[in-house]
Amino acid sequence: MSDKKLLGVDEALGRILQSACPLDAPETLSLAKAHGRTLAKDVIARRTQPPVDVSAMDGYAVRRADFANPATRARLIGESAAGHGFISEMKPGECVRIFTGAPVPAGADAILLQEDAIVENGLIAAAAPPEPGRHIRRRGLDFSQGAPALLAGTRLGAAELALAAATNHPDLCVARRPRVAIIASGDELVAPGAEPGPTQIISCNDVAVAAIVEAAGGEAIELGIFRDDLTDLKRGLTQAREARADVLVTLGGASVGDHDLLRPALASEGMTLDFWRIAMRPGKPLIFGRLGEAFVLGLPGNPVASYVCALVFLAPLLRALQGDPTAGGDKTEGAVLGCDLPANKGRRDFMRATLMQDALGHLVARPQPLQDSSLLTELVRSQALLLREIDAPAAKAGDPCRILRLRKD
C-alpha cells in the first residue's frame, strides 16, 4: 500500500472513537477516592454559595448614603465575622465592623475598606467614599441550589473536587475505569532487571503505555512479554480475555516481516479488523479492530512510535469509554518554527521538539535533530510534538505551526 492510500490520522481516530460508548456499571466513590476519575452523572448543587451576601474584604459595613457628605461620621454598633454575623438591621448613621467572609448586615449596601476608614471614639469617617455594592459577594455568586455544578464526563482534578465538596456532595458517581490488557511481543525483549542476551533489548513500551493508560483514567493490566510464536501469542490473547479487558493493547509484531505474527494470532482468535497501517510518522503499522467486546489497538514496536500512538489514539479512546465528550477534540496549539524545515511527504509527521519563548513572547518549537523512532533520549528531552501535515511545503523559521504538548507527569 502506498502512503497516499493509507488511512489519515483524523479518520483513524474518528473510527476508533465511533463506537466507544461509555462503559456500563458506574460506581460511587467518596471525594477522597475520586481524584482523576470521570463523572458519570451531573453534580447538582445542594445549596447556594455564598448562602447570603458576604464581605470580600476587611472593613466596615456601611450605608453609602450616610457618607454623601465627607464630614459625616457613622456610629459603630457591632461586629460581623465569618460564622458569627451581626443579626440586627443597621439604621441610618450606623455601621458595623466586618471581616472577610462575614455576612453583610441588613441595611448595609457598601463596604468601607479598613484602610479607607478613619476611626475615632467609636465613630467612623471615610477617607474615600465607599462604592455601592463594591467588595460584596452576592448570594449565589458562585452557584445556586438546584443548578448543575459539574457535568457528566468531567475529569475530576483538585478544583473539581473542591467544587463538588462545596456543593455538599460527599460522594460522586464516576465512570468505571477501562481495563486495558497490555501484551508486549518479541523474541528480542526481556523484562527490566533481567540479563539480556547479546542481541536482546529491555522491554520499555509496556511501561510507558501502562503509565499513559493510568494517566487517562484506565486500569493497566500488564500481561508480560510473549515470544514471536503463534501459540505463545494466542496464549497472551487468552489471558487478556480472562482479565475481562475492555481494551487490548499489543506492542510490536504489527508490521509485515516473517516474524510479525500478531495479526495472524488476532485473526485466529476471531478479531474483526477495522484498519491496519495509517499515514502517520512515526506509527504507520497501527492495528485497530474488535475481539469480541474488547477494542484491539496494536501499537508499533519502536518505542517512540508506540508512545506517540498511545497519546494520539489510546488516551482518547479511554477518555471516550469514560464518557468524556471532549475525548476526540483537537489538543494542539499554535507556535512558530524555530528553524527551517523541508517539505513533508506521504504521512502526517509528529516530530519531537523543544519549546521556548522568544523575546516577543512567542512560543517557539524547534525539532530535535534526530527523529528516529527508537530514540527515547530525544523524546525525554522534548516538550512537544511538532505536527507537519501531509504534503506540507517547506517552511521557514518564524512560520506558524501546530504542536501537541507532551505531558510527562
Image (cartoon, rainbow, N blue to C red):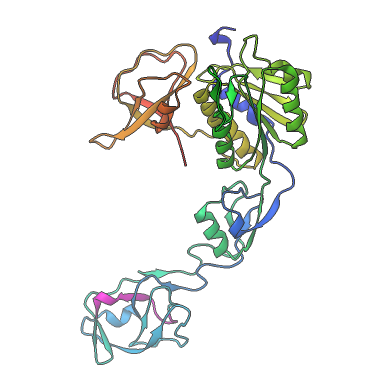
Q: What x and y, as percent, mark residue 76?
A: 33, 89
Q: Quadrant of residue 291?
A: top right
Spot the residue most to the top. Answer: 2
Does 106 sit left or right of 262 as displayed?
Answer: left
Asked whether 401 falls inside the magenta stretch, the response is no
Q: What x and y, as percent, mark residue 303?
A: 52, 25
Q: Quadrant of residue 380?
A: top left
User: In percent of the image, x 48 and y 64: which residue is there?
Assistant: 141
Q: What x and y, as percent, mark residue 67?
A: 27, 80
Asked whether 110 falls inside the magenta stretch, the response is yes
Does 50 sit left or right of 363 as displayed?
Answer: right
User: In percent of the image, x 78 and y 21: which residue is there?
Assistant: 270
Q: Quadrant of residue 319?
A: top right
* The one of 245 and 226 positioned closer to us in this rendering: 226
Does the rendering let one see residue 229?
yes
Q: In the image, is residue 254 above or below residue 132? A: above
Q: What x and y, as percent, mark residue 276?
A: 64, 17
* The one of 30 and 92 positioned closer to us in this rendering: 30
Spot the residue most to the bottom. Answer: 121
Total residue callouts: 0
Q: In the image, is residue 279 above or below residue 358? A: above
Q: Quadrant of the N terminus?
A: top right
Q: In the image, is residue 292 above or below residue 214? A: above
Residues in magenta, as a range: 105-117
* The one of 126 and 289 positioned closer to us in this rendering: 289
Does 397 sit left or right of 225 as displayed?
Answer: left
Does the rendering let one see residue 328?
no
